[in-house]
Amino acid sequence: MFPQFQRVVTLSVMSVLVGLFTWIYLRDRQPRARLWMIGWASIVVHFAGMLLFTFGLIPSRLADWSAYATLIAAAAAFSLSVCQTRATRLDRVLFWATVASAVAYWTCMVCNVQSPALYRALLAVVLAAGVWHALLQPQRTAGSLAAWFAVAIAPGLWAAWRASANVGFGMDFLLFEGFAITGWRYWRYFRRVTPGVSLTSLSFLAWGLVFPVAEICGALHIAIPGDHVVWDLPKYFVAFGMIMTLFENQTEILQIEISVRKRAEETAQAANEAKGILMASVSFAASRMLSAAGWETVIPETLSKIGIAARVSRAYVARVHPAEPGLVGTVLHEWTEISRAPLTEGPRQTRLEWAGKEGNARAASLHRGDVVSFHARVTDHPSITDHPGITEPRHITEPRPSGSGPHPELPKSSILVPIEVAGSWFGFLGFEDRRREREWTEAERDGFRSAARMLGAAMTRQRAQEYVDNILRSMEESLLVADTELQIRRVNPSTLRLLGYSEEELVGRPAGQVILEREVPARRSAVERTYRTKTGQLIPVLFSSAEMRNGSGALEGYVWLAQDMTELKRVQGELVRAKEAAEEANRAKSVFLANMSHELRTPLNAVIGYSEMLQEVAEDRGQQDLLPDLGRILWAGKHLLGLINDVLDLSKIEAGKLELSIESLDVLPLIHDTVSAIRPLVEKNRNRLEVDCAEALGAMLGDRIRVRQVLFNLLSNACKFTENGLIRLEARRTRSKGSDWVEFRVADSGIGMSAEQVERLYRPFMQADASTTRKYGGTGLGLAISREFCQMMGGSLSAHSELGQGSAFTVRFPAATLAPEPLLAATGGIAERQLVHA
Amino acid sequence: MPRILVVEDNEWSRDILARRLSRRGYQVICAADGRRGIAMAHDQSPDLIVMDMSLPEIDGWDAVRRLKADPATRAIPIVALTAHAMASDRKRAMDAGCDDYHTKPVDFESLVRSMESFLEARNRLALPAIVPPAVPRSVGRNPAAQLGDP
């Protein structure tokens, strides 16, 4: 009866306690009160299970389930309530490892798994977690470790050893561990001796102790009187102590919690302040970089500002060598704390090299634009080569002092931030802390990133500036830039060379000192102007002026480009003089030709005129014997006239002065005229002329006079070199090269020409043979001139001949597209294929 | 009988032209310089003038311009006969007011054809038809070709 009564009372008391915690929780919303409530609710369930089992209402197996499950739940809740306030990642790992192991252990046990090895393993996990926890305590001492070992580890080990005999023994130790750790931590957390805290902590410890004690007693067969009361007492004390703590120290605990929260806030504020300092240093650096001419002049100051603000040991700028494997860089600039030796000394540049897979990964991350950070491990640190000179890599990790931990001179934490210049990866900004291992805060990362971005922007800007400078420097032309007041603002080296001034003598001076013209601001392109040098010499220049406007279109000044024209002028002058001389010579030639023509024609007029008249007179008087001599005089005169005309034509052709008037010509009338004009010549050597022309010849394009001249020339040649023979004139339309042609062919049965003679045919004054001139007459210019005419009219002239077999000349002219209609009417006789026999 | 005024400074050229024209049945009067040519054009009212261009006193171009500017002589056709045989010379002569242009050495038949066409046109327009009599070819100098004074 007693146990039943005791359990009913216990259950009642526990229910009241749970009610109290619920009330407190609902009133104050204390997170810990909620966990306690859960813990105590579990214990109520635990007692309820015990009670039901006592009255035989549930089987023992279910009682076991409820007993251990609820106790584990309670231990977890209480432990969590203590852990939560200062929960670190380590705490959470420990907690869940313990809970998971405990659940696994208990599941195995109630399922009656008979495997001591498994139980030992699970116990070992819990013990290892405990040992780990003890070792990692920040303020561990030998005494506390020993105490920990004595109260927790040793019984645990014993339980593990005993697991094969009594598996429940191990479970009890687990619970002991859970409650003991909770009590210990509770104590450590509040760290003040108040009745509530002391009672709670000690009660947790005692509660944990009763399980192993009970097992030990059971193992030793020692009967403990009123054992159930003894076993349950610590629970009451715990609950009592907790309630005391809550009530008694409610205010203080809240205050403590408030102070803890405040400390966290202060930390955050400090971080904010640090961030502010860092940001201030970064923005300071930014302003310096923007105002300075070159980023390299301000980088030492910038690095020291940021380094001090971020409390690092070293800050450096490195240029990367992306072509090399791993992460390889050259330190360009460096700042170190006063106590640290810099890697770089004097003008030497230090080479950093992170080799291997990690180096590659870091290079890849930086290339992507990511920040890379790492803690001290020997492989994390670059080998360093001083160069030039020393090429042997020197590891700064070499002499490690005795004991663990990295070399004191080794950076414990490093962070590398990529620098991008003009869109490509330039290198990185590196920061190291050699005093302590640290996690880089977001603020620091942001600050470093800003610094790197700003540095990259400054480098980009400087590069662009240098690019422009290089362009100006390499320009051959003189460049002057003036402001709207026409004061010179910028000059390039070419200008200085041209004018003989130094830069200081020109910048800031009025432009009028150099450029003579007043209308300088006007837009001009490639006009001639005059510059005045320092010595007062005037230089002709090819000058261009443009307005310089800023992005919004406002006038900022003027840009003047000039090129020295002295040499050009000289050459130009020579050219002009040469051209004038050539023109003068040409004019003289023309005048000479005209005069010659005039002076020759006048006497020739008399020669031809008198001989013609004398021929008539001789015929009238019947003095036939005089006729041949008169004929020779006449022939010679006409030959001379032909020569004069041909020479004039040729000289005009050569001078490109011959003008043709191209028109559409009806072909048939043309043939008619030519045939009737040539007839006397045909008859002279007793030749026959055969004209064979196609029906529809239409019209062709050409100069009427010159076409006739060509045809006449070919026919007269044929007449000259043929005796008692046949001369054929053929005309037809052909089509070749995609266009229509009118083609004339003059063939004779005369003396013909050899291949060499054909070749020389078109050379002026070259008849087939020098002797032919005497025999056949002619100037030797006719064919050359005819061919020129044909080509000028878009046609061609070709010859085919064999010695003794006669010659054939073919000329063709472009056909006119529109064939004139009244062709037949105009030409009358020549229709069909008609042969004209002369 | 059409009356032709030959203005020509070169004695041989003048002589040969005058004689040949006379042989063809024209009445030929001659002048040796531009000034005399203009005067004779006024005084003798020729049916046609054959004009050399390079003339002393007043050159041929100037003389033609003057004759063509004067209403009294404007209607007389003027044929240029000159040793200036370049293409530009033809244009120069026509621009001055010549009605036709022939170069020396003269193609006599062509010149006569040209003259006849002008004379015919003139006859059709203003005068009754003048049929040149079939003059027997005479030998020797045509008295008309003689100059009154040099």
Image (tube, coloured by chain):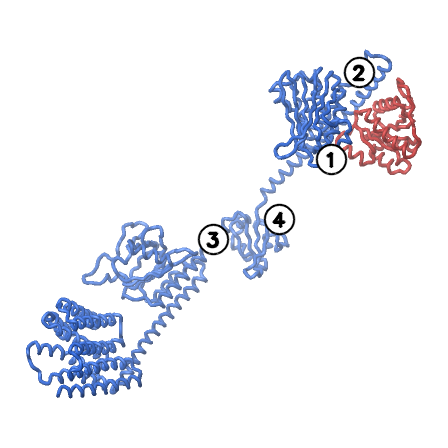
Chain colours: A blue, B red
Q: CA distance from mark 4 to mark 3?
A: 29 Å
Question: Residue A571: where, in percent of width, then height?
Answer: 60, 39
Q: Secondary structure at mark 1?
A: loop
Disc with the residue nearer the chain's start (3 vs 1): 3
Question: Going by the picture, which residue comes out furthest to the left?
Answer: A221
Q: Which residue is mark 1?
A: A820
Front position among marks 2 and 4: 2
Amino acid tagged 2? Leu
Same chain for the residues under marks 2 and 4 in the image: yes
Badge 4: how crowded within 10 Å, few (<14), some, or many (20+)? Answer: few
Q: Residue furthest top?
A: A625
Q: CA distance from mark 3 to mark 1?
A: 71 Å
Residue A467 numbered tag: 3
Quadrant position of residue A740: top right
Quadrant of residue A48 in the image? bottom left
Q: Which of the two discs, 1 and 4, labels the residue nearer the N terminus? A: 4
Q: Is residue B12 left or right of residue A654?
A: right
The correct choice, above or below, for B130 with respect to A171 in the image is: above
Q: Are marks 1 and 2 in contact (CB under 8 Å)?
A: no
Q: Residue at x 39, y 56 (%)?
A: A425
The residue pinned by badge 2 equals A630
The kind of residue tagged 4 is: Val
Would you call the spot at circle 3 few (<14 residues within 10 Å), some (14-19), or many (20 or more)? few
Callouts 1 and 4 on one subunit: yes
Residue density around tag 2, few if under 14, some if 14–19, many if 20 or more, within 10 Å: some
Same subunit, labels 4 and 3: the answer reads yes
Percent position of residue B82, x then y: 80, 29
In three-dimensional space, the C-alpha distance between marks 1 and 4, rounded to whole angstroms, equals 55 Å
